[in-house]
Image (tube, helix red, strand yellow):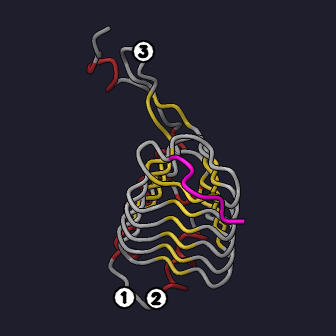
């Protein structure tokens, strides 16, 4: 089945309201990304104004990229480090006491490859409390990472990870139970 790019470009992936919110976020993004590193409260405040639900003591670095702030929920005492991608086409829920290291990619959407026009598929993802997502790991659409987990550097989690697990590799596999 060949891919139909002209049809793909005509996909109606977003409502008019979502398009308008995307435009507003696009205009405000420089206020987020150009703010000095210590301005964590400012970046959280800005995302909250756009519908994000963000807890207390959250540190979002200025190079974090957020697709749709209104689909983002972050608990208390969370660090989201340099160059993290929060591709929140659908909800991304991050529990409390979570560390997301540099370059991690949380992806809450994909395309339906079975159709030639590749329409978007929205699949929320969840990161449990007390979890560490190490450098440059990838969390795929629809994945749930249990509480107390470690996802190793460059691991690719495309299936749910049970609580208290250390996973590594591509695809990510349980290396050790942490409890």
Q: Residue placed farthest to the bottom in the image?
A: 38
Is 66 in the magenta?
A: no
Q: Which numbered disc, 2 or 3, marks the residue that appears first in the sequence?
A: 2
Displayed quadrant of residue 119: top left
The relative height of residue 62 versus residue 11 in the rendered view (above or below) is: below
Q: Which residue is mark 2?
A: 39
- What's drawn in magenta, residue-wise? 173-179
Quadrant location, the C terminus: bottom right
In the rendered image, which residue does mark 1 sit on?
Answer: 36
Q: Are marks 2 and 1 in contact (CB under 8 Å)?
A: yes
Secondary structure under tag 3 reads loop
Above/below status of 89 relative to 118: below
Q: Is residue 149 left or right of residue 11?
A: right
Spatial CA distance of label 3 from label 1 is 44 Å
| Most common secondary structure along the magenta stretch | strand
Label 2 CA crowd tier, 10 Å (few <14, some 14–19, many 20+): some
* 158 over 130 or under it: above or below: above
Residue plotted at (61% across, 48% down):
125
Q: Callout 1: few (<14), some (14-19), or many (20+) C-alpha neighbours within 10 Å? A: few
Residue with the mark numbered 3: 115
Query: Mark 3, residues whose alpha carbon is within 10 Å: few (<14), some, or many (≥20)?
Result: few
Mark 3 or mark 1, earlier in chain: 1
In the rendering, at what x and y percent does residue 146 appear?
68, 56
Between label 3 and label 1, give the one nearer the viewer.
Answer: 3
Percent x, y of residue 80: 49, 73
Image spot of residue 48 (x, y percent): 61, 70
Q: Quadrant of residue 132?
A: bottom right
Q: CA distance from mark 2 to mark 3?
A: 44 Å
Assign a secondary structure to mark 1: loop
Asked if 149 appears above or below 89 in the picture, the reply is: below
What label does residue 144 carry, if any? none
């Amino acid at each position: 089945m060949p891919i139909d790019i002209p049809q793909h470009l005509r996909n109606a992936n977003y409502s008019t309201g979502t398009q308008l919110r995307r435009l507003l976020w696009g205009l405000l993004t420089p206020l987020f990304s150009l703010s000095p590193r210590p301005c964590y409260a400012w970046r959280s405040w800005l995302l909250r104004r756009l519908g994000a639900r963000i807890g207390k003591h959250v540190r979002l670095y200025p190079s974090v990229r957020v697709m749709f702030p209104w689909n983002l929920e972050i608990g208390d005492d969370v660090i989201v480090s340099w160059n993290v991608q929060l591709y929140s086409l659908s909800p991304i829920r991050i529990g409390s006491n979570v560390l997301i290291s540099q370059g991690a990619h949380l992806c809450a959407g994909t395309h339906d490859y079975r159709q030639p026009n590749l329409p978007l598929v929205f699949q929320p993802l969840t990161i449990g409390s007390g979890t560490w997502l190490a450098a440059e790991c990838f969390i795929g659409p629809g994945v749930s990472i249990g509480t107390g987990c470690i996802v190793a550097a460059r691991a690719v989690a495309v299936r749910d990870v049970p609580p208290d697990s250390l996973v590594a590799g591509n695809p990510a596999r349980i290396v050790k139970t942490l409890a």
